Image (cartoon, helix red, strand yellow):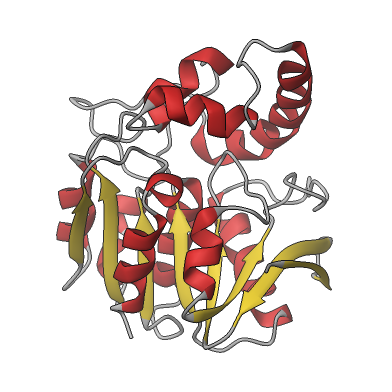
Amino acid sequence: MMILKTIDTRHAPVRYLEGGSGEPLVFLHGAGGMTADDPVLAALARTHHVYAPYLPGYGETEDCPGLRDMLDYTLHSWDVVQALGLTDPVLVGHSMGGMIAAEMAAIAPNDVSRLALIAPAGLWLDEHPTPDIFTLLPFELPAYLFHDPEAGSKLMTSGLKIDDPKFLQDYLVRNARQMGMAGKLLFPVPERGLAERLYRIRARTVIVWGESDRMIPPIYGPYFAAGILGARLIRVPEAGHMVITEKPDAVAEAVAALG
């Protein structure tokens, strides 16, 4: 069971989810946010003591106008780790959170010994462009996020139809706030020079990708793996970008193998 807690940082109080037991693990969510019921958190909590902070503008964590660019968010995330009282936790990030986790490991290579990047953003290949998430409509998202779009649509809407006014109202309000933060890192393209810093990462690294990912195509996986010394790339069949929802046990198994 994940419990919602609060810590103070220089920029604002940060709300975070905590649960499980074992080695400490920090999970950084993607642009779609997270909830206490996310399957990946439950799976990770079976083997680790999980800390999952809400990024600024997500959940009940306040917006932080003072955070302007990739470096600011990277340092803020290290501030969160310090406020949690953690030293060398397993660092796990999904999508946008994977981008931040990779930057954290690159900027402080001696402070991260185990790193898991799950379909991370952060690289850009002209021949394999990623969709513009800022222009996608709600009904278009399941096809990009899930191996099984129909099942994914039900997960996104908690069983409501994706054009149900109740779902749309909640989604649009929440999405507007979240995309304000995400835009600083992902707009107009999710590239902030990470490719030039991957070589600095010294952590034992696993990269996990759903084979059906249409949001960030699996072709990006080998490029991440090539940039990080000794990184292991794991492809998960019958899973899309939301491999953390469709195949949480496969993700947890890959993370557990880091030791």
Q: Position of residue 150 (x, y in %)?
A: 43, 22
Q: How many marks?
A: 0
- Residue at x 18%, y 71% (from the top left corner): 229
- Residue at x 37%, y 83% (from the top left corner): 113
Q: Position of residue 219 (x, y in %)?
A: 17, 39
Residue 75 lies, with reference to residue 60, above or below; the image says below
Residue 179 lies, with reference to residue 17, above or below; the image says above
- Residue at x 55%, y 71% (from the top left corner): 26
- Front-most of 9 and 91? 91
Question: Can I make out residue 53 in this image?
Answer: yes
Question: Can I make out residue 121 in this image?
Answer: no
Residue 188 lies, with reference to residue 71, above or below; the image says above
Quadrant location of the N terminus in the rendered image: bottom right
Q: Is residue 94 left or right of residue 177?
A: left
Q: Is residue 233 left or right of residue 162?
A: left
Q: Position of residue 245 (x, y in %)?
A: 46, 47
Quadrant location of the C terminus in the rendered image: bottom left
Q: Position of residue 6 (x, y in %)?
A: 83, 69
Instruction: Tell me where residue 224 sits by quadrant.
Output: bottom left
Q: Is residue 236 left or right of residue 83?
A: left
- Residue at x 41%, y 31% (from the top left corner): 145
- Front-most of 68 and 49? 49
Residue 192 lies, with reference to residue 18, above or below; the image says above
- Front-most of 62 and 227? 62
